[in-house]
Image: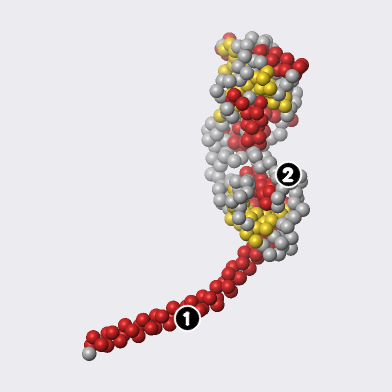
Amino acid sequence: MKKSLNVKSVVVLTAICAVISLLLAATNALTAPIIEKNQAAAANEALLVVMPDGTDFEKMDLSSYELPATVTEAYKEAGGGHVVKLTTTGYGSGFVIMCGVNADGTVSGAVCLSSNETLGHEKTFGENFAGKNSETVEAVDVISGATKTTAAYRNAIKDAINAATILGGGSVDIRSEEEILMDNLTAALPAGEGKFTKLFLTEVMEGIDAVYTADNGKGSVCVIGEQFVGVDESGAVVSGAEGDTAANVSAQMAILNASVETEIDLTAYADLPSALVSATKTATGNYVLNVKGAGYGINGGDDYHPASGEYIYIKVSMTKDGKIIDCLTVSQAETPNIGDACATESFYGQFVGKTEADYETVDGISGATLTTNGYKKAILRAFESVKILEGGAGNEE
């Protein structure tokens, strides 16, 4: 009898489970479309923040497109516009931005979805891009004191505009400036195998803006404006120039390849600035100076951005009459994402061609006054050092 009851209980429980399963399936069949519709509405609401007039957003499959690396999602809008979601790095990583781009290529809106930034400027900065396009987006100034954050935001908006162009069937060059440069160098000198290093110049190269040497020693590329001239190991021009231009490149490279530096004994000179670390002189009479600057690492410091206690070390080549041939930041320990911009060519490259009369016109680093002032004072000490080494007088403080 007990066994019969157990069998009956199992049958009843099985029947109940079957009924519940059927009810759940029926409920899911009824509610799934409603849930999906609500989720779509929520997604559209988020998209409408950056494209208020948009309708019928459709998520796109990005697998067949070559887009900027920052792009993670994209939605096509019925009117031909696109909403692009991007993840980039500002002061910190995980900086997520959503940007709407109208069919005519103008930004309809932009908003930060999440970030690990420190100053909060990313919360409202997107408002500055409404109505901007690929030609005018650069006009949006980065915010002093939040250069890293706002510059990353602006670059992400440019990526969104480019992505929208590509997704709409257009074409755009999405290579970085560094990638474009390397491609041009490789085209001028294929034997360099795509690996080049910018040469620090110790001689005046008439008519030549920069020289890049192949890391494998197979030659160099001279840059003249937007022209790239390939030169082999012997100094012969192999591509990019003919006639007088080719002859000048060969002549200038011969001067550069024959350049020899001699160490200068600084103890033989009185009153040299203490900022001068070492110096050499070329056979043509130019000077190569290593100087140190007391930037934020020496003069700054607080709980938020503690001073490193390190100088900025700078390498400067200069003619004997005091004109800068080349400039390079060798090492620095300034505040990350602020003062450390002194190590970028966009900053130190500004000193090329300057003299003591106009070096102070170089643009400073936004939000890094101590770094800028320390760097410029080191450049001044370089000018003073050359005057003393040439037999004149300096003016050390």
| Circle on res. 226 | none
The vertical placement of 227 against 256, above or below, is: below
Question: Which residue shows up at 56% across the image and 29% down it?
Answer: 331
Left or right: 393, with 28 as reference point: right
Q: Nearer the viewer, residue 286 or 394?
A: 286
Tell me which residue sits at (28%, 84%) in the image: 7
Q: How would you rate the neighbour count of disc 2 (Cα within 10 Å): few for under 14, some for 14-19, many for 20 or more?
A: some
The relative height of residue 304 versus residue 56 in the rendered view (above or below) is: above
Choose the circle earlier in sequence order: 2 or 1: 1
Which residue is situated farthest in the bottom direction here? 1
Residue depicted at x 63% and y 47%? 67
Instruction: Give percent across and percent down for residue 149.
Output: 63, 47
Residue 316 appears anywhere in the view:
no
Q: Residue 55's image quarter?
A: bottom right
Q: What residue is drawn where x is 61% and y is 26%?
A: 190
**Number of dots carrying numbers:** 2
Dot 1 alpha-carbon crowd within 10 angstroms: few under 14, some 14 to 19, many 20 or more: few
Quarter of the picture holding the N terminus: bottom left
> In terms of image quadrants, where is residue 363?
top right
x and y percent of residue 165 in the render? Answer: 71, 49
Identify residue for label 2: 138
Tag on residue 23? Answer: 1
- Quadrant in the picture for residue 35: bottom right
Depth check, front residue: 283 or 48? 48
**Badge 1 amino acid:** Leu
Q: Element at badge 2?
A: helix
Direction from residue 383 to residue 313 in the image, left or right: left
Q: Nearer the viewer, mark 2 or mark 1?
A: 1
**Percent x, y of residue 218:** 58, 20
Q: Amino acid at mark 2?
A: Glu
